[in-house]
Amino acid sequence: MRDDVAPRGPAVVVVMGVSGCGKSTIASMLASRLRWIYEDGDWFHPQSNVEKMHHGEPLTDADRGPWLNGIAAWIDATREAGNHGTVACSALKRAYRDILIGTRRDVRLVFLKGGRELIARRVAARDNHFMPPSLLDSQFAALEEPTPDERAITVSIEPHPREIVDIIVAKLGIAEPATPR
């Protein structure tokens, strides 16, 4: 493990929620604050998935298999290298989270929770994203909120992103790296 990485806490934090809840923003801010590696789950989608979503077609579980396995492989590589990281991934269903986290006790889940109206406004305001607003209902329909055994940290998306990151860091109990002088 590198000296500039917090010595306690999880190896990886998966930031989950429906499209437009702020996963990428929060996961990247959390990684920056903790000096961890950041990955966006969207980067793991095969082109066929991106095309389907771009055309307003919801993905099937079969479509998601290779995508989830790719993210899980990144999680394992990060852990095996002794690094820490965050990844933004919708992880809407328990079965998906079981692939990403499963029995990995050093991987934690953060659920960004928000109402459909607020998230719809955010999705409508995004430019050049392959996930169209028309698929938001399918996201909420597929969402299975984490259960207590998943040890998820649930955070409202209403506060400012910096406040959300403050909440996550506090709930994780992570010792933050010292600020360089």
Image: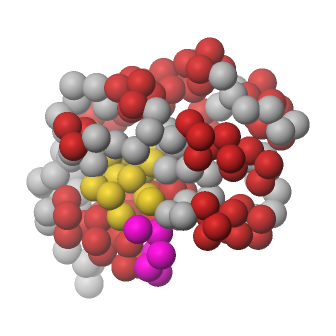
Whether residue 42 sits left or right of residue 48 in the image: it is left
Image coordinates for residue 33, horizontal then vertical, percent: 35, 69
- Indicate whether 8 appears above or below 105: below
Q: Identify which residue, 63 or 57, lies in the foreground.
A: 57
Q: Residue at x 80, y 32 (%)?
A: 57
Is residue 79 rendered to the left or right of residue 57? left
Residue range of the region highlighted in magenta in the rendering: 156-161
With respect to residue 67, does 119 lie above or below?
Answer: below
Residue 153 appears in the figure: yes
Please provide percent x and percent y for residue 128. Answer: 82, 57
Measuring from the top left, give residue 83's x and y in whole percent.
Answer: 28, 43
Quarter of the view holding residue 21: bottom right
Q: Quadrant of the N terminus?
A: top left
Q: Residue at x 69, y 49 (%)?
A: 136
Q: Residue furthest right?
A: 55
Q: Residue at 28% of width from left, 55% of height from top?
A: 153
Q: Is residue 143 above or below residue 44?
A: below
Nearer-the-camera pick, 16 or 47: 16
Q: Residue furthest bottom?
A: 181
In the image, 115 versus 174, the foreground residue is 115
State how many labels appear.
0
Residue 19 located left or right of residue 76: right
Most frequent secondary structure within the magenta stretch: loop
